[in-house]
């Protein structure tokens, strides 16, 4: 049973689908596999089933052994996997005790106790975190977001007899190392491959399925809804139409931010954002391309235009590309605005901008001609093992991404945020 947060009523989980049951029980004897991969669409139920499967397997075959739960970050791992998992385990008799400071969970069941360490595989240096351990098995949540060095180091730690690997992920580019080394070679690696679609999650209503189909487009639709490993190509925002996403703001705004993609040789793009009726409007912008104007502006000259863009509005913060150290210092030196280094995760940010546009959380106003122009020109690179965008027609796109990622999005600690300055005017 689970409690409905809206009405406080308890309701039963929907029955498991056939594929979810396969993920839950694949390790039961006789089992010819050393690993399992669950990939496919978002909201297909693969994460919870695989995590319950991992804990059940570990507690059934081992006692007094260390295991690893791995995510892109420890914070995202706790939010996406551990917090939903622990109540489920508790409801069927597992006793779970988490040590936040030491980064592990002790789980007891029927006289056995094992320890599950939490690791984040954010970058190449993360591999050092797991060196020297001896593990009975490892679960990789969103393995396609982790560097290969971290994944292979974690697997190398699994030296106990009977150790197994559990992988789950949403699809990425077909040039991704995990797709080529594991999914395409699943049989020769003694790995069970289970591909999920949203139809494999019986708890999703038709209304929810329709909402997800409306939400995504292009490569994100093919990956997150259809569960395909496809290359990103063509326009980054192919759904963007001015008649749909461009309109004026009618009403008074209650909060303001400015987002900045700073450049001296490259174009500089600043956008003024106002919150009105629960929607963020890009009210107006400053865009300067020195190669077109023939005038290369200094930090102080760009700051003067920032002041003009803000006019006398009470700006909560100016969100700046974190690599623009000199301009951040310039803003802080003048003392009027709080400079906020932007969250700068390109692919996550692009997805969040697309979601925010489609959900009506952000709107572009008619005076923002350069942002409207770039939406029609911003493209994926044609080739490569990993997704990347062309470094052209991307300056307003970057400042919009900084705004959405930092103000509407998730911070690096995984918490939902609106960045509000202390003592904001």
Image (cartoon, grey):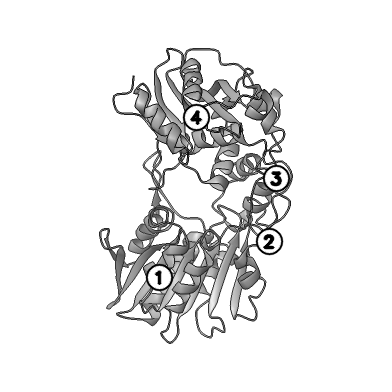
Question: Dot 1: within a 10 Å radius of its alpha carbon, few (fewer than 14), some, or many (20 or more) residues?
Answer: some
Q: Nearer the viewer, mark 1 or mark 2?
A: 2
Q: Is residue 214 left or right of residue 34?
A: right
Q: Report the residue at 50% width, 33% height from top.
A: 403
Front residue (pair 168, 407):
407
Would you name the residue on which mark 2 appears?
174
Q: CA distance from mark 4 to mark 3?
A: 26 Å
Label 4 or label 1, whichever comes before in sequence order: 1
Residue 288 locus on image (x, y percent): 60, 25
Would you name the residue on which mark 3 appears?
218
Residue 337 locus on image (x, y percent): 38, 24
Label 4 or label 3, whichever comes before in sequence order: 3
Q: CA distance from mark 2 to mark 4?
A: 34 Å
Label 2 or label 4, whichever comes before in sequence order: 2
Q: CA distance from mark 3 to mark 1?
A: 36 Å
Question: Dot 2: within a 10 Å radius of its alpha carbon, few (fewer than 14), some, or many (20 or more) residues?
Answer: some
Vertical relation: 140 (above or below) 164: above
Would you name the residue on which mark 1 appears?
55
Would you name the residue on which mark 4 appears?
259
Q: Nearer the viewer, mark 3 or mark 1?
A: 3
Q: Nearer the viewer, mark 4 or mark 3?
A: 4
């Amino acid at each position: 049973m689970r409690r409905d947060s809206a009405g406080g009523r308890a309701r039963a989980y929907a029955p498991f689908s056939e594929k979810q049951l396969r993920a839950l029980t694949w390790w039961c004897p006789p089992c010819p596999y050393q690993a399992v991969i669950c990939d496919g669409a978002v909201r297909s139920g693969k994460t919870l089933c695989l995590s319950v499967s991992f804990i059940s397997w570990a507690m059934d075959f081992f006692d007094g052994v260390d295991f690893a739960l791995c995510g892109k970050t420890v914070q995202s791992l706790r939010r996406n996997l551990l917090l939903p998992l622990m109540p489920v385990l508790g409801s069927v008799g597992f006793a779970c005790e988490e040590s936040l400071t030491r980064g592990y969970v002790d789980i007891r069941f029927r006289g056995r106790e094992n320890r599950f360490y939490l690791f984040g595989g954010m970058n190449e240096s993360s591999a050092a975190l797991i060196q020297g351990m001896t593990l009975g098995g490892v679960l990789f949540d969103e393995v396609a977001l982790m560097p290969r060095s971290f994944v292979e180091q974690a697997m190398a730690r699994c030296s106990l007899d009977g150790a197994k690997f559990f992988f789950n992920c949403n699809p990425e580019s077909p040039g991704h190392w995990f797709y080529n080394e594991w999914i395409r070679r699943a049989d020769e690696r003694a790995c069970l491959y289970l591909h999920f679609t949203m139809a494999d999650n019986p708890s999703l209503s038709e209304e929810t399925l329709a909402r997800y189909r409306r939400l995504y487009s292009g490569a994100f639709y093919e990956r997150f809804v259809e569960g395909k490993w496809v290359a990103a190509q063509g326009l980054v925002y192919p759904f963007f139409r001015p008649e749909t996403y461009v309109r004026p703001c009618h009403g008074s705004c209650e909060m303001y931010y400015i987002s900045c993609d700073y450049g001296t040789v490259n174009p500089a793009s600043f956008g003024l954002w106002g919150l009105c009726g629960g929607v963020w409007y890009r009210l107006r912008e400053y865009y300067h391309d020195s190669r077109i104007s023939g005038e290369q502006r200094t930090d102080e000259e760009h700051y003067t235009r920032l002041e003009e863009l803000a006019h006398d509005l009470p700006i909560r913060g100016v969100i700046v590309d974190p690599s623009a150290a000199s301009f951040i210092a310039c803003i802080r030196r003048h003392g009027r605005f709080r400079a906020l280094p932007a969250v700068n995760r390109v692919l996550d940010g692009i997805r969040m901008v697309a979601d925010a546009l489609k959900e009506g959380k952000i709107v572009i106003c008619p005076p923002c001609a350069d942002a409207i122009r770039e939406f029609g020109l911003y493209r994926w690179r044609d080739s490569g093992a990993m997704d990347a965008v062309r470094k052209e027609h991307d300056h307003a796109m970057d400042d919009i991404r900084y705004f959405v990622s930092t103000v509407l999005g998730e911070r690096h600690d995984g918490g939902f945020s609106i960045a509000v300055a202390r003592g904001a005017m």
